[in-house]
Amino acid sequence: MAALTPVGTLLTPSRLFGLAILAPVLFLAVGSLASFLTDLLRRNQDH
């Protein structure tokens, strides 16, 4: 039955609120990971 529910019911306010919290957290995590990887690459090039 869950598969028959329209897409609109999936976007409940609580889920949108969760996405609003998760989006910046994921953005910061990806950004820190990217900077960490570039830092590693620069260190490897220095040696």
Image (cartoon, grey):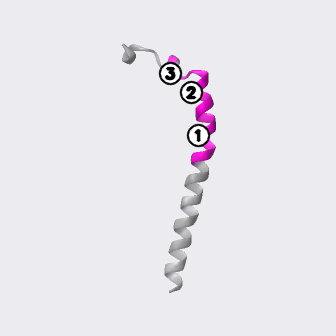
Residue type (three-letter) at the residue carrying disc 3: Leu
Marks 2 and 1, Cα distance to the nearest angstrom? Answer: 10 Å
Residue 17 x %, y %: 63, 30
Whichever of labels 1 and 3 marks the residue nearer the N terminus, that label is 3
Q: Which residue is mark 1?
A: 22
Kindly identify the residue that appears in the image at 58 percent across and 64 percent down: 35
Count residues near mark 3 (Cα–Cα under 10 Å), then give few for <14, some for 14-19, many for 20+: few
**Circle 1 — which element?**
helix
Left or right: 19 in relation to 4: right
Marks 3 and 2, Cα distance to the nearest angstrom? Answer: 8 Å
Task: Please tell me in which quadrant of the rendered image residue 22 appears.
Answer: top right
Kindly identify the residue that appears in the image at 48 percent across and 20 percent down: 7
The kind of secondary structure the magenta stretch mainly shows is helix
Q: Which residues are magenta?
A: 9-26
Q: Which residue is mark 3?
A: 10
Residue type (three-letter) at the residue carrying disc 2: Arg
Q: In what quadrant of the picture does the N terminus appear?
A: top left
**Circle 3 — which element?**
helix
Mark 1 and 3 residues: CB-CB less than 8 Å, in contact?
no
Residue 15: which disc?
Answer: 2
Residue type (three-letter) at the residue carrying disc 1: Leu
Q: Is residue 14 magenta?
A: yes
